[in-house]
C-alpha cells in the first residue's frame, strides 16, 4: 500500500488481480468510516485501488451493488459480534451482553452503522439476497436471546422494542445528543437486566 498525494491509501503497489473485489470493499469501508457513504464512488475507489476506472464494474454493477456488499459484510460482522457476546454472557445475562456489544459496535462504526440502519440499502435489497439474510440473521440473534426469558408469543414484539431502544441510543450518540458512553446507559437500564 502507498499513500497518494492527498494522504489516502492506494493499493497500486500491492494490487493483485484476484482480489480486486475484496480490495474495493475494504477501501470503500475506509472511505465510509472517514467521510460517510455519500462520498463513495466507483471512480474514486478505482483511483485509490490503483486500477482503471472501468475495473470495479467487473465486480459491481454500480455504486448501489458495492454499498450492498459493504452493508452485507457489516451485518455479518455485527451478527458475529452479537453471537459472541451472547455466548460469553452469564446465564440470563445474554441480553445485556448483546446490548453492550450492540452499542459498542454502533459507537465504533458510526458511518457503517448509518449505512446499515439509516439508508436505502437494506430496504432496496432483493428478497433472498445475501444482504437480507445477513440483516435478518442479526435480528434473529436478538430473538434467540429473548426467547430464554420471554413468552414465545411476545418474542418478536420484545425484540423490536429492544432493537428500537438500542438503535435510538446509537443514533442519538452519533448525532451528539448523548455525550456519555452508551454502555453506562445499558448498565442501568431495566430493559436489558432480565433474568
Image: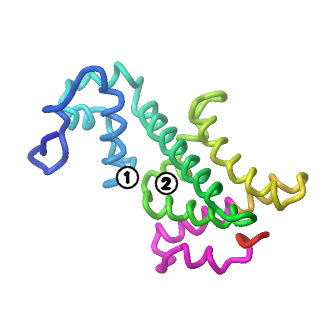
Task: Tell which circle, 1 or 2, labels the residue nearer the N-terminal end.
Answer: 1
The residue nearer to you, when weighing 87 against 26, is: 87
Give how far apart the Cα atoms at labels 1 and 2 are. Answer: 8 Å
Left/right placement of residue 171 relative to residue 128 reads left
Residue beneath the point at 20% across and 28% down: 15
* Residue 181 position in % (x across, y down): 49, 76
The residue nearer to you, when weighing 18 against 52, is: 18
Specify the quadrant of the image occupied by residue 157.
Answer: bottom right
* Residue 62 position in % (x across, y down): 40, 28
Specify the quadrant of the image occupied by residue 20.
Answer: top left
Q: Are marks 1 and 2 in contact (CB under 8 Å)?
A: yes
Q: Which residue is mark 1?
A: 36
- Above or below 45: residue 185: below
Q: Which residue is mark 2?
A: 114
Q: Which residues, given as a range, are shown in magenta?
A: 163-190
The quarter of the image holding the N terminus is top left
Left/right placement of residue 79 relative to residue 63 reads right
Left/right placement of residue 105 relative to residue 124 reads left
- Above or below 92: residue 113: above
Residue beneath the point at 75% across and 50% down: 144
Magenta highlight on residue 4: no
* Residue 158 position in % (x across, y down): 79, 60
| SS at mark 1 in the image | loop
Specify the quadrant of the image occupied by residue 17.
Answer: top left
Amino acid at each position: 500500500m502507498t499513500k497518494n498525494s492527498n494522504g489516502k491509501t492506494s493499493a497500486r503497489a500491492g494490487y493483485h488481480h484476484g482480489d480486486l473485489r475484496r480490495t474495493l470493499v475494504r477501501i470503500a469501508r475506509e472511505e465510509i468510516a472517514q467521510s460517510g457513504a455519500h462520498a463513495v464512488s466507483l471512480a474514486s475507489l478505482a483511483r485509490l485501488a490503483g486500477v482503471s476506472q472501468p475495473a470495479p464494474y467487473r465486480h459491481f454493477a454500480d455504486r448501489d451493488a458495492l454499498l450492498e456488499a459493504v452493508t452485507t459484510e457489516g451485518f455479518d460482522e455485527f451478527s458475529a459480534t452479537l453471537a459472541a457476546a451472547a455466548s460469553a454472557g452469564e446465564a440470563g445475562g445474554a441480553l445485556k451482553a448483546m446490548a453492550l456489544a450492540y452499542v459498542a459496535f454502533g459507537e465504533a462504526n458510526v458511518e457503517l452503522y448509518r449505512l446499515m440502519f439509516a439508508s436505502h440499502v437494506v430496504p432496496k435489497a432483493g428478497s433472498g439476497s445475501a444482504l437480507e439474510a445477513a440483516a435478518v440473521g442479526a435480528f434473529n440473534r436478538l430473538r434467540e436471546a429473548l426467547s430464554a426469558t420471554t413468552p414465545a408469543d411476545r418474542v418478536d414484539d420484545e425484540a423490536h422494542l429492544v432493537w428500537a431502544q438500542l438503535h435510538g441510543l446509537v443514533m442519538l450518540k452519533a448525532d451528539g445528543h448523548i455525550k456519555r458512553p452508551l454502555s453506562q446507559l445499558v448498565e442501568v437500564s431495566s430493559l436489558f437486566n432480565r433474568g
